[in-house]
Amino acid sequence: MVVDGQSGDRVVDGRFKRRLLQSIKKQADKGKSFDWIVILGGTNDCFNGYKSNNIFAVLKDLYLNSENSGANVSALTISNFNNVSTCKYSDPSDKAKPYDLASQIQHTISLMVFNYSIYTFWL
């Protein structure tokens, strides 16, 4: 088992994809492949205001790279943001605006991942 998540990383412009591809390559160099690759990404992207289409495009690329390596892919949706206090803002009155935006992005991404999974892997 390899756990290679990094707190604060993003899928859109972060190191997520590079780390994933390096892990896949390390296995391939040993003549192996992962049985399963579990991908949970996009949470920090939501809170940084990236557009849902941009986040999903990168996630979809990660799913395809993982699948092409011979692994089964578990595409996890982003958890609901139930606790606004986890977000840090300079002015407490500004909490709702970024939180609402992040929640909308999270909801859209979760639907995109769900629909992609259903139409790609089940139908």
Image (cartoon, rainbow, N blue to C red):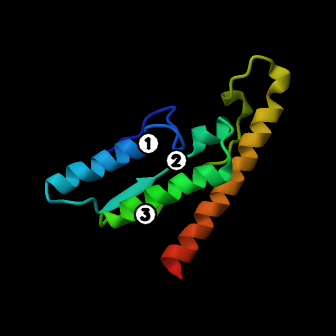
In the rendered structure, find residue 109 and report the number of the disc placed on it: none
Q: Label 3 amino acid?
A: Leu
Quick check: 47 left or right of 59? right
- Can you tell which quarter of the image residue 69 is in? bottom left
Q: Check the image and report above or below for 42 versus 98.
A: below
Q: CA distance from mark 3 to mark 2?
A: 14 Å
Closer-to-camera residue (102/81): 102
Quick check: 41 left or right of 110? left
Q: Label 1 amino acid?
A: Phe
Q: Point out residue 79 in the picture as x, y percentages from the top left corner.
A: 61, 48
Q: CA distance from mark 2 to mark 1?
A: 8 Å
Element carrying mark 2: loop
Question: Disc 3 marks which residue?
Answer: 64
Element carrying mark 1: helix
The tag earlier along the polypeptide, 3 or 1, is 1
Question: Disc 1 marks which residue?
Answer: 16
Question: Disc 2 marks which residue?
Answer: 41
Quick check: 39 left or right of 123? left
The tag earlier along the polypeptide, 2 or 1, is 1
Which residue sits furthest right? 93
Closer-to-camera residue (83/121): 121
Q: Residue at x 44, y 55 (%)?
A: 62
Element carrying mark 3: helix
Q: Residue at x 79, y 28 (%)?
A: 95
- Mark 1 is surrounded, within 10 Å at the Cα level, by few (under 14), some (14 to 19) or many (20 or more) other residues, namely many
Viewer can see residue 32: yes
- Can you tell which quarter of the image residue 36 is in? bottom left
